[in-house]
Image (cartoon, rainbow, N blue to C red):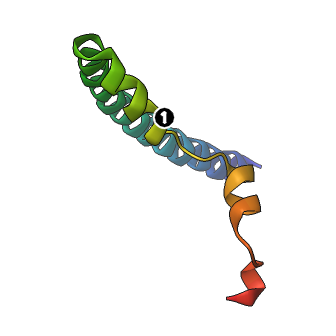
Amino acid sequence: MVKKIEKEKECLILNLAKAEQEVELVCEQNRELDEENRELLKQCRSSPLQCSAESKSKKRKSPKMMISSSPGSINDI
């Protein structure tokens, strides 16, 4: 019984360490995206017409659009 609990404790410690690493990674990605957003906002404020055209061209497709826009299925490849 004690060994089982110790093993579970080790698993929890490992999971916690992995989760902390993921949090650090997500925080770093968030900082990078924040910086990109600030730069884009500066560009939009300096030239609103250009910003409108750029934002339309940089929109990402949703997964549904990406799937429905492909003419064949994955098995056709």
The image quarter containing residue 48 is top left
Left/right of residue 58 with respect to residue 36 in the rendered view: right
* Residue 36 x/y as whole percent: 29, 29
Query: Which residue does the image show at 76% across and 86% down from the upper left?
Result: 75
Residue 12, compared with residue 7, is above or below; it is above
Location of residue 55 in the rendering, given as x and y in whole percent from the top left corner: 43, 31
Q: Is 27 on the left-hand or right-hand side of 74? A: left
Measuring 77% from the left and 49% from the top, which residue is drawn there? 1
Quarter location, residue 72: bottom right
Residue 64 on image: x %, y %: 75, 51
Asked whether the viewer can see residue 57, the reply is: yes
Q: Give whichever of 31, 57 is nearer the camera.
A: 57
Residue shown at 48% from the left, 34% from the top: 56
- Residue bearing mark 1: 56
Q: Is residue 58 visible?
A: no
Report whether 66 appears left or right of 47: right
Badge 1: residue crowd in 10 Å (few <14, some 14–19, many ≥20): few
